[in-house]
Amino acid sequence: MTGKELKILFRQDKAYLTADRPMTFEQLGLPDIAKTFKEPAFWTIKVLNHRENEKKIFCEITSYQNGETDFGSSQKLLADKLNDLQIVTFKSIDTTGLLKTLAGSSGVVRPIKFVPVDRTPIQQTEFVRQPHKVSIKETFYVPLKNVRFKLGGVSFDKKFKEHKKTLELTIPNYDIREEFDAVKNYFSNVLKTKKIEVTVNIEITDNEVTSIEAKSPEIEKIDKQLIDNVKFEFVKSTTKKKINVEIDKTLFTMDEYFDTFADDKFKSNTFYNNDKELFEDLLTISNTKHYKHLRFLSSKHSHDIMKLRFVHKPFSFIFLIQGDRNYHIIWETLDTEEATYVWHITKDINVLKMTLRKIEDIINVIKVQGKTAYISSTDDAFRRIYHDYSDLVDGFVKWKGELENILT
């Protein structure tokens, strides 16, 4: 702004560098004689120095005029910077020019001896401005889909009429992690709301935000128990999800399963560190008739050799149990009344990999043609162990005995 030529317009007891913001005579350092201008007047000034951090300009007055005028286009373009000013000081003020513009065209003001031509005393008595403070206290609603989950809380952007910039508001909650953003629609389901209520307290000093506090009763409800409920809701939805396109793959590791059946941005480590944890939750949330059977198979599964495999339809598991002489691959369903299928192979990792690919094809055949077609045509080394659901015997004990007899 240094070197710019500007106009200061005077209207009664106010001075204007822009049309919409008056300045006091104290901010201009005018002497006590300057109480009010009887008629509109203006001074033309040249900016000698602009101290932006102090919101102050030091100027030279080049002319004193009576009458109406308007700001030049270049001055209008500087409106934002001029509105930010708090102090204007002058190199000197000509006594005659001051008195002329104070009196207007029809009046006379007598010279006052103590009005100095040298403006040094005026510069020494600069106006000390009080900080301009604004407080915002407001309650409003935000769609949960517009909220960003991050480590230690949630955030969103909001514009307030009292402040020209958009603010990022954060509601703290140390149970929340960034990974939850991919499943926030499930948080909406568990919280039973699509919007959260937010109350904010914001303090602004000289257009700078000095304090922000945001709270939400819905976000405060999110704790470890609610996160578990979200996790269960999410897992249930993946087991029931229908796929519109055909998928050749049937056996999935945990990561492959979520990549295929979960939302695009979901990562398996959002809720689970390993397939054991997912398996436990599936037993917890399902009303399975094979609870004891699956629990037993999980305890015997050789996690160090093969990751647990998941089958989407019918929802089921592929376990690996290591016998003295053979590997035993076992297919058990979660909640359908199917027999337990057991394939026996030699203890060889390459044979294991090949057999898993073959079992994937077998399950596809069974889903399309039925189990009878597979059983009647296969010469695979496999057995079926039936479940006894009658109340007369303990079906699990009977099933477990038959299984252990063939795990060689």
Image (cartoon, rainbow, N blue to C red):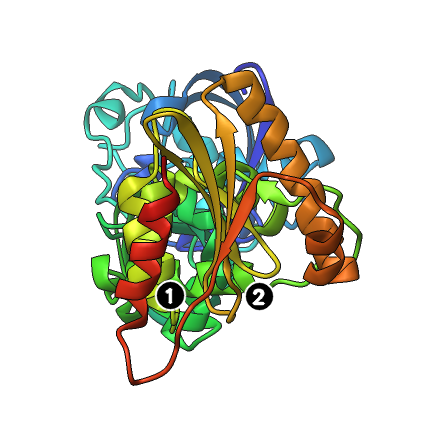
Callout in the foreground (2, 1): 1
Residue 314 or residue 193, whichever sits in front? 314
Give residue 30's quadrant in the image: top left
Counting from the top left corner in percent of width and height, residue 48 is at: 47, 14
Counting from the top left corner in percent of width and height, residue 309 is at: 50, 41
Task: Bin the neighbour count of mark 2 within 10 Å (Cα to Cα): few under 14, some 14-19, many 20 and up.
Answer: few
> What quarter of the picture does the N terminus occupy?
top right
Q: Is residue 60 left or right of residue 283?
A: right
Whether 97 is drawn above or below 399: the answer is above
Residue 299 shows in the view? yes
- Reading the image, the residue beneath label 1 is 290
Q: Amino acid at mark 1?
A: His
- Reading the image, the residue beneath label 2 is 240
Q: Are marks 2 and 1 in contact (CB under 8 Å)?
A: no
> What quarter of the picture does the C terminus occupy?
top left
Q: Secondary structure at mark 1?
A: loop
